[in-house]
Amino acid sequence: MKNTSARSKISAAFAALAAGIGLLVTATPAHAAEYTVTSNCDVPWITCSEGDLWLLYNSKEYAIKDGRYVTSWAAFYGNVSDYWGTSQYQGSTLTTYRYVFNGNGNGAWQYVKNNAASVQNCSYADNYRVYYNSGYGGTSQYFAHNEPWGDCNLTNLISALKNENASQHFA
């Protein structure tokens, strides 16, 4: 009898362990990972193509010297509700992300939110609008698409948006 009782206890322990492992596998972490990215194309669930909007750290007078960029930039394709926030995917919170300017020149690795001074729209088809507030609110500025084989216009943000930018979307 003792042998059967020991086997029952061992079986019950394994069943409890298996149930616990099953709960751990299906559980969602309380705090999602945090990422720093220089482009929303770096976010795995965003599909990007050519034709993006660049936000630059310096105004256009200080962004290019001797034909090359001396300021840092961040590249975007599509809508960004907040340059510093939490992404949602299929109803689940995945990631806390912080967009930063790339490591080239002035403003390297600074946050994009509330730090951009100029914009360059290099898209041949898409117009953009940059907003003061997260969630596409407040004062905004429109940036028309670029003509094929034309120069990407480098435009300063208006004074209400210079270093006060929080979101963007296709216009």
Image (cartoon, rainbow, N blue to C red):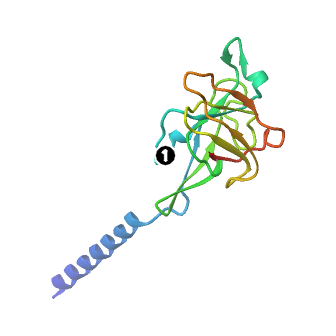
Q: How many discs mark residues in the rendered view?
A: 1
Q: Secondary structure at mark 1?
A: loop
Category of crowding for the residue at label 1, using alpha-carbon neighbours closer than 10 angstroms: few (below 14), some (14–19), many (at least 20): few
Q: Amino acid at mark 1?
A: Ile
Front one among 107 and 131: 131
Front one among 35 and 163: 163
Tell me the quarter of the picture where residue 66 sits. Answer: top right
Task: Give the residue number, with chain letter if any, for mark 1.
Answer: 46
Left/right of residue 163 with respect to residue 35 in the rendered view: right
Residue 96 x/y as whole percent: 58, 52
Question: Most extreme residue toward the front, as rendered?
Answer: 147
Residue 128 x/y as whole percent: 64, 41
Residue located at (55% from left, 40% from top): 77
Left/right of residue 30 with respect to residue 141 in the rendered view: left
Q: Where 167 falls versus 71 (above or below)? A: below
Residue located at (38% from left, 70% from top): 23
Q: Where 5 falls versus 38 (above or below)? A: below
Question: Most extreme residue toward the top, as rendered?
Answer: 66
Left/right of residue 28 with respect to residue 17 in the rendered view: right
Tell me the quarter of the picture where residue 21 sits. Answer: bottom left
Residue 33 x/y as whole percent: 54, 52
Residue located at (75% from left, 28% from top): 58
Front one among 49 and 128: 128
User: Where does the C terminus fall, quadrant-wise?
Assistant: top right
Left/right of residue 48 with respect to residue 38 in the rendered view: left
Residue 69 x/y as whole percent: 67, 20
Question: Most extreme residue toward the bottom, as rendered?
Answer: 1
User: Where does the N terminus fall, quadrant-wise?
Assistant: bottom left
